Image (cartoon, rainbow, N blue to C red):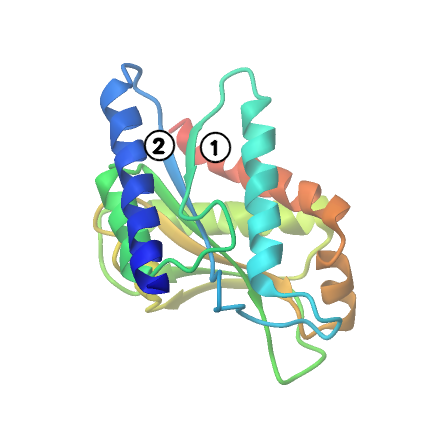
Amino acid sequence: MKKVLKNVSFVILLLKMCFIFGQETTAQKRIVIDVGHGGKDTGAIGINGIQEKDVVLNIANAILKQNNELEKPLDIYLTRYSDTLISLSDRTKLAKTLNADLFVSLHCNHSDNPDARGVEVYVTETQSKYLDESVWLAFQMQDALNKKLGFKSRGVKFANFQVVRDTISDCPSVLLEMGFLSSNDETEYLAKKEKHNGIATAILESITKIGQL
């Protein structure tokens, strides 16, 4: 029954997005922010007990709030707006249905090495006409988080994550790992909701740059 309810909720969300898409008359850039994990999938758990699924949702909501305060806000949608588990295929399906111009997946990292720290941004290994834009955006995000917040940059990396692999044929696509929940310093930072606004600002500014291209 829970699976049925989840599927019904996703279909309703999809229909709402399609209705908005059909009503829109301006040529706005459409951004899909994939809020990692959710529901029974907690993602990484920090040494202070915080859960990745909550951190990324708080940051995504901060991005939405800041975007809505802009004079010319971007057309941003989330893959989930609450503590709900959405399948990877449904996340990419939403981006395709909305004809997204950009896909950004938000995550936090974890390592067995307690000294591991910093930001990683991933792009797919799959060749696409959008790959160069994806790499450019990845460097923009890494640089913004480093300069604005002092986060260590661990580099732009290539990997075969499903959400970026399955969206790269349609738009630029990146997966952002916003620090390590296994690090004392970074998990303490990410546990503070007031810090989420700074992260959201850095991400939104990077998204805005590619949205203006």
Dot 2, crowdedness within 10 Å: few (<14), some or many (≥20)? some
Dot 1, crowdedness within 10 Å: few (<14), some or many (≥20)? few
Residue 119: tell me if it is visible. no
Q: Secondary structure at mark 2?
A: strand
* Quarter of the figure with residue 47: bottom right
Residue furthest to the bottom:
112
Q: Secondary structure at mark 1?
A: helix
Kindly identify the residue that appears in the image at 32 percent across and 69 percent down.
160
**Residue, disc 1:** 209
Q: Amino acid at mark 2?
A: Arg
* Quarter of the figure with residue 110: bottom right
Which disc, if any, is residue 15?
A: none
Residue in the foreground of this view, choosing between 96 and 134: 96
Work out whether 15 lies above or below 51: above
Q: Could you tell which of marks 1 and 2 lies nearer the N-terminus?
A: 2
* Quarter of the figure with residue 200: top right
Residue 26: tell me if it is visible. yes
Please state the horizontal and vertical placement of residue 132, each as a whole percent of the image: 33, 49
Please state the horizontal and vertical placement of residue 205, each as a whole percent of the image: 56, 35
Q: Amino acid at mark 1?
A: Lys
**Residue, disc 2:** 30
What's the CA distance linking mark 1 and mark 2? 13 Å
Kindly identify the residue that appears in the image at 55 percent across and 15 percent down.
71
Residue in the foreground of this view, choosing between 78 and 14: 14
Work out whether 112 lies above or below 120: below
Kindly identify the residue that appears in the image at 27 percent across and 45 percent down.
11
Kindly identify the residue that appears in the image at 50 percent across and 50 percent down.
139
